Image (cartoon, helix red, strand yellow):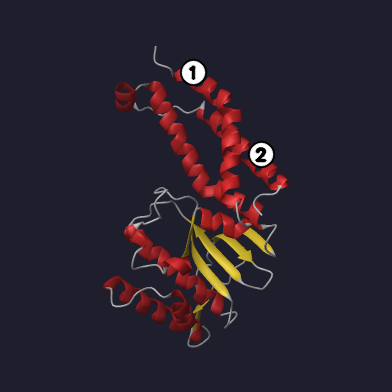
Amino acid sequence: MGLTNQQSIDIRQLLKGRIRHKLSEYSRETTNMPFHVRLLGKERVAIFSFIQSVNTSMGMSIFEQMAVIIAAQHFKRAIRQYKDFNNTVSEDTQVIIQHIMDNLRSGWTIPDKPKEIADILLVAQGGKIKEVKSPRIDLFLESEEGIEYYFDIKTVKENRGKCFGLKRELLEWVAIRGTVNPNPNIFTGLAIPYNPYEPNPYNRWTFQGIFDLPNELKVAEEFWDFLGGENTYDDLLGVFEEVGIELRPEIDEMFKKFEDK
């Protein structure tokens, strides 16, 4: 499958618009970095700052928007920043989740997402039901078969302390959904847009012993091809390269004013 012509056009326009906006925005920045400038030079510091800004923007927004553009062709629903989510949870499920987290943290059990989901849903409508803050989902998908996918799109190198919080969040999504439907066909997981260790497998040690990697994590090609079919990841890289070539003169022109005299 891969990207359709229209998807390629839409993603190309998204990227060009965002990069041009960043170029315009950057030209008005007045951040003072005197030590970095004297050590590395104005142009290198300016380029580094711009790359950091683009990287932040891609993590927050661009990857989500691209995911919806791609998934909309293959799923019944594809929504970014999904808010139409329940805000009630059973206290019994909170006890189960705490038990799961304690066992993972101590190393007494290994991650087993299907079992964790089953244990949570078993008590999701029992005990006292209370209100909690309704979560916001980075990417929600519903397949034609009724499978619900809830993704948190994360940066490529999360620290271990934050990983425990992410794990709890994914379990809580199951518990919240279970108060409305005791038997949802549900997937909650993390999406990592690219593999920084390529060509080696993604092997972030911070995820080990916390996440059931085959059932909770989709990285790079696995994630994008899941959304759009085989070759989607490679097609995306091609679109990024084309946009980079097209915008290179504009980027070079903007950074000329930072050249060291």
* Residue 140 point in image, percent of width and height: 60, 63
Cα–Cα gap, marks 2 and 1: 25 Å
Q: Residue furthest bottom?
A: 126
Q: Which quarter shows the C terminus?
A: top left
Task: Residue type at mark 1: give it.
Answer: Lys
Residue 13, numbered label:
2
Residue 81 in view, yes or no: no
- Who's the residue at 39% across and 22% down the image? 42
Q: Residues within 10 Å of mark 2 (few under 14, many from 20)?
A: few
Q: Is residue 126 left or right of residue 32?
A: right
Residue occupying the point 44% across, 78% down: 116
Q: Residue 136's mark? A: none
Q: Residue at x 54, y 33 (%)?
A: 22
SS assignment at label 2: helix
Comparing 73 with 154, the one in front is 73
From the image, tell me which residue sits under label 1: 256
N-terminal of the pair, mark 2 or mark 1, is 2
Q: Is residue 174 left or right of residue 167?
A: right
Pick whichever, 49 or 199, lies toward us: 199
Identified by mark 2, the residue type is: Gln
Report helix, strand or loop for mark 1: helix
Residue farthest top in this picture:
261
| Residue 204 versus residue 257 in the image, above or below | below
The image quadrant that residue 41 belongs to is top left
Coordinates of residue 113 in the picture (x, y in percent): 45, 74
